[in-house]
Image: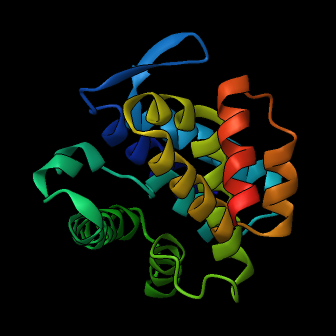
Amino acid sequence: MERFEQAVAIFDKINAGDPHKVLCDGVETPETLCHTRRLSSWLAKLAPSASEALKLAGHCQHLKRWETPRDSYPEGKKGYLQWRAAQAIFHAKESSAVLEQVGYDEAVINRVMDINKKKGLRNDPEVQVMEDALCLVFLEFEALTFAAKHPREKVVDIIRKTWGKMSMRGHAEARSLQMNSALQSIIEDALQES
């Protein structure tokens, strides 16, 4: 596990460079580092015996995401999809360099990239676990802030789409989350309309 620990330490050091700070368990923390911790925590809960590749993928899913902000692309779905595609390529390149540096072979590197690019979603159990974990991080920690910045109809639509990407296990975990009543109402509306 030495190279795993080395890779995680490097990913954490890189993610700690995020200039945007959030409260993470009551401590001001670089946003990407906080997201990584939350994602890794959900991955550990959803897949306690996860492969090394899945664990690594959790630590580099949003590597250096702050370098290309969403608003650097056009508004709307097309701009969002362009940004996501560019981010996937960027994350893959950055993550691959770190994994290669600590001694991972091409097979492991490619597997980490496939998980992070969500190749085989719905058919690949590890990719589905990653998607569930990402959705749960959004619902537990980010959805309320998102809802405060956007019209209710848009938030309902995003929650509906998020729910549609999740597995039955993800749905069960989401239903067990402690949520603000306003967010709970939005989720109920999204699920009624789906």
> Which residue is more in the foreground, 142 or 33?
142
Q: Is residue 96 above or below residue 8?
A: below
Q: Quadrant of the N terminus?
A: bottom right
Residue 47 shows in the view? no
Residue drawn where x is 40% and y is 66% of the image: 99
For the image shown, how many numbered marks are present on the structure?
Answer: 0
Image location (x, y in percent) of residue 172: 88, 54
Q: Is residue 41 visible?
A: yes
Q: Residue at x 65, y 32 (%)?
A: 183
Residue drawn at x 52%, y 77% is 118
Instruction: Check the picture and name the quadrant holding the C terminus.
Output: bottom right
Q: Quarter-wise, where is residue 25 in the image?
A: top right
List x then y, in percent, for residue 23.
Answer: 49, 16
In the foreground, 179 or 160: 160
Left or right: residue 5 compared with residue 66:
right
x and y, in percent, of residue 94 in the image: 27, 63
110 left or right, relative to 185: left
* Depicted 12 relative to depicted 157: above or below: above
Q: Horizontally, is 81 left or right of 184 in the view?
A: left
**How is the protein colored in the picture?**
rainbow
Who is closer to the viewer here, 131 or 153? 153
Q: Residue at x 86, y 62 (%)?
A: 169
